[in-house]
Structures are given as C-alpha cells and as structure tokens.
Amino acid sequence: MDQTAGKCDLHTHTQASDGMQSPTDNVQLAYAKGLAAVAITDHDTVAGVAEAMAEGERCGVNVVPGVEISTRAGGKDIHVLGYYVNCSDRAFLKRLADLRNTREQRNVKMIAKLQELGVNITLEEVISGLGRELRPDESVGRPHMADVLVKKGYARDMRDAFDRYLGENAPAFVSVPRISPQDACLWIREAGGVPVLAHPGIYGDDDLVRKILEEAQPAGIEVFHSDHGKEEEKRYQAVADEYRLIVTGGSDFHGARQGVVFHGDIGSRSVPVSVLDQLKKASANR
C-alpha cells in the first residue's frame, strides 16, 4: 500500500491509557487507512510510545511520540497535547506519574459516588475489565468505567454512561486539583516537545479558549477533531490564524466499545504530513 498520501492523525489513544487497542494495533490501523503518520497521545503517560515506534519502523508509518496532559482552567477540564516529547526525560516522567496518581484519586472518588447513587460497581471490576494486568505507567479512565456501566445494564452505551453518570455535569463526576494549562505547556517544552491545545470545541467557552491561548501560549491548536463540526473547524481555523498557531487535527481514537467507535475512527480526522515539519521546527526553536 502506498503510504505517501501525506495525511496524519495526530490524536490517538492506546491501552496505555483509556484506549482499547495496543500501540501496535494503532499503527497497523493507521497503515491500513493509508496514513503517512500517526501520533500516540495517551493521557498522562508515554508508556505506549516505544512499542508504537517499533511497529512504525517495521511497517513504514511515521509515529509521532506524544502525550495528552490533563489540566484545569475556568472550572473545566482542559487537555493539552504534547508532540515530540523526550520520552526518556526523568523529570517529565516523574511529573506524569504524579498526574496519574491524581487520576487514581479521582477514580476512587467517582466509584464512591456511583455507589452512593445505587450503582453496584467497584474499581476492581473496572481494572479486571481490562482483561490484562495494569502496568505501573498505565492508567484507568472514565471510558473504562463506562464500559462496565454498559455491561452491567446501568447505561445503554458509552455516551449514555457519560451523560447519565460520568460527564462533567453528571452526578458521579469528580473534579480533583490539576495543574494549569500554563504548567502543562511549560512541562512539555522542558521535555523538548511542542504544546498544542486539544479539542477547543469541547469546552463550550471560546472566551476561556482565548484566555488559555494568551496565558499558556501553546504552539498550536487542534482545529480538526471528531467532535468538531464544520462550523467549529472554520471558527478555530480563524483563531489559529489570529494567534499564528500551528493547525493540528486528529480522530481522538479510543477504539470501539459495544461496537461503537469513541470518539472517531483512526484517520477520520487528519492533517497534511507537512504539519509534522511545523511541529519539528517549533520543537527545535523552543
């Protein structure tokens, strides 16, 4: 298959965080879709990057080492993507470990809230639902909880589980102290990477988006995302032009649960491979 079409998906998750596929699977799926490149951007971990890069070397897909860092601003969870981070940087790895510890504390509190709501679910069930042993540098996320809620009949599907229980305005949601987008951008830069504001349309607050862009000063913004419609793409393209930001995009692929792909399939959102040159240049000039 010709992998020179020049498209890349810069937002995918693996089993290292809350994705369903292994890092190898993600790369193979990218190859099957004819993508030239795919980024591995797991939540608060780079545990899947090495495996993905090895598979990329084998099948000829350019794998971009990345991460998606969880932050908090304006009363909302804000995600910051980091590209071309040094996955061996000890200080960065320690910081990510601290973030995963915060996620674990949130998980315990959310399970307690679910139980208070009469939902018979335990964290042990969620972890056992992975079907494999959880590594120290991996983490459990809300999609794992949603999977169990659906299997036990508490929700119709993943979206219903988030709407009914796990989403930001749902009764079992728990907000824990998180770092700021400014800190995340700084950490990514100090690890040799390039920070990009993830899926701004999800936050529902463009004033907050602009405030983050001005205060945290990421190098790019994710204009193309599975949860962005044409109007959002047009709006954030204009924002990117205004702030002179690199325009990135990706599917936010997590795999399929109960036959439904969450958020979108690999390659369903992409950007030209030339964006990688812009990211590399920003990394070199940081």
Image (cartoon, grey):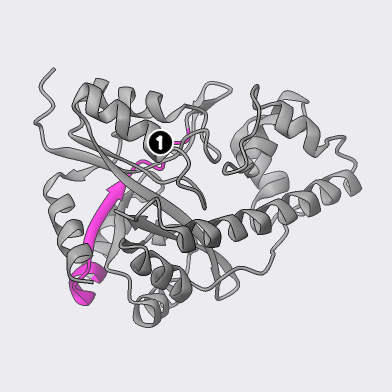
The picture places residue 4, in percent across and down from the top left corner, at 9, 31
For the residue pair 130 and 193, the one nearer the viewer reads as: 193
The picture places residue 121, in percent across and down from the top left corner, at 83, 35
Quadrant of the drawing holding the N terminus = top left
SS under mark 1: loop
Magenta stretch holds residue 246:
yes
The answer to whether residue 79 shows anywhere in this view is: no
160 displayed left or right of 64: right
Name the residue type under label 1: Gly
> In the picture shown, does residue 206 fall above or below 224?
below
Quadrant of res 211: bottom left
The magenta span reads 239-254
The picture places residue 89, in percent across and down from the top left corner, at 41, 57
> In the picture shown, does residue 161 fall above or below 236?
above
For the residue pair 284 and 269, the one nearer the viewer reads as: 284
The answer to whether residue 48 shows anywhere in this view is: yes
Q: Residue at x 23, y 72 (%)?
A: 286
187 displayed left or right of 172: left
> In the picture shown, does residue 166 fall above or below 255?
below
